[in-house]
Image: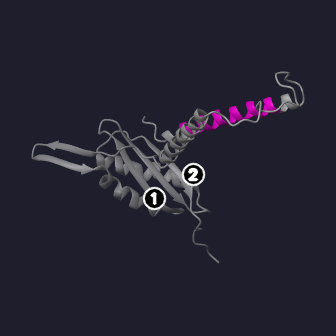
Amino acid sequence: MTDLNRPARLNRTLLVLTGLVLLAGGGFAVGTHFGKIPLLAPGTTLVPGTALPPGWAWYAVAGGAVVVGLLALRWLIAQPVRKPKSRTWRFDQDTGQTALAASTAVEPFVAEVATYPGVHAAHATLGGTQDSPVLAVVLSAEQDGDLAAIRERVTEEGLPRLRQALDLGELPMTIEFRFSAKTGSRIH
C-alpha cells in the first residue's frame, strides 16, 4: 500500500536527530562543566582571542543559515501533503469510454459518512490506479463522538457501497480522525 503520511516519517526522523544532537551537546556541556570530560578545562574561554573572525566566516554562517532556512521551509511545505495522488479513471466498454474523476467517485461516500452520528465533517481522497486503488479518509469527529462506532460503520456500510459502485474487489483504506470543537446534540 502507498505510504499516505510521508511527512510523518520525515518529522520523526528529524525530531530524533535533533533530539540526539541536543542530548549529546547537553551531555558534553554538563560533563565538561563538572570536569568529567577532561577535553576542556572548566575555566577556559569558548573561543581563543577577541579578534573578529575572518571575512569568509560571515559568508559561511550566512550560507549555513540560508540552507537551514530552506530546509525548514521544505519541512513546512511537506506538512499538508497527506493525500495520495488522485487520478481520472477510465472504463472501456463496447459502447465507448467513460472517464470518472476520482474526486467525483467519492462524493456520495463522503456525503453519506458526513451524516453518521458523531461525525462533524468528512473528506476522502481516492488515489492510486484502478489496479491498486487506495482511499484516504479524514473525519472530523465531535468531542463526544464514538470513534470505534464511526469506524465500524464506515468499514461495514460506507466502504462496501463504494467498492460495489466502483466494481472493486478490495479497497485499502486509512482513516484519520480529528476532533471538532463542537459537541453533538444533547437531550436535556
* Quadrant occupied by the N terminus: top left
Q: Is 165 left or right of 112, judged from the image as shown?
A: left
Q: How far from the left and from the top, in percent, is residue 108?
A: 35, 58
Q: Is 97 left or right of 35, judged from the image as shown?
A: left
- The residue where tag 2 is placed is 148
Q: How far from the left and from the top, in percent, is residue 182?
A: 58, 68
Task: Report the residue at 49% width, 41% height from top.
Answer: 5
Relative height, residue 38 to residue 130 (above, below): above
Specify the amino acid type for callout 1. Answer: Ala
Which residues lie in the magenta part? 9-29
Q: Nearer the viewer, mark 1 or mark 2?
A: 1
Q: Which mark is residue 29?
A: none
Separation of marks 1 and 2 at Cα, in angstroms: 16 Å
Question: Are there few (<14), some (14-19), or many (20+) residues within 10 Å of tag 2?
Answer: few
Specify the amino acid type for callout 2. Answer: Ala
* Quadrant occupied by the C terminus: bottom right
Task: Report the residue at 14% width, 43% height from top.
Answer: 93
Residue at the far top: name it.
38
Q: Which mark is residue 122?
A: 1
- Which of the 4 quarters of the picture holds residue 135? top left
Q: How far from the left and from the top, in percent, is residue 73?
A: 51, 46
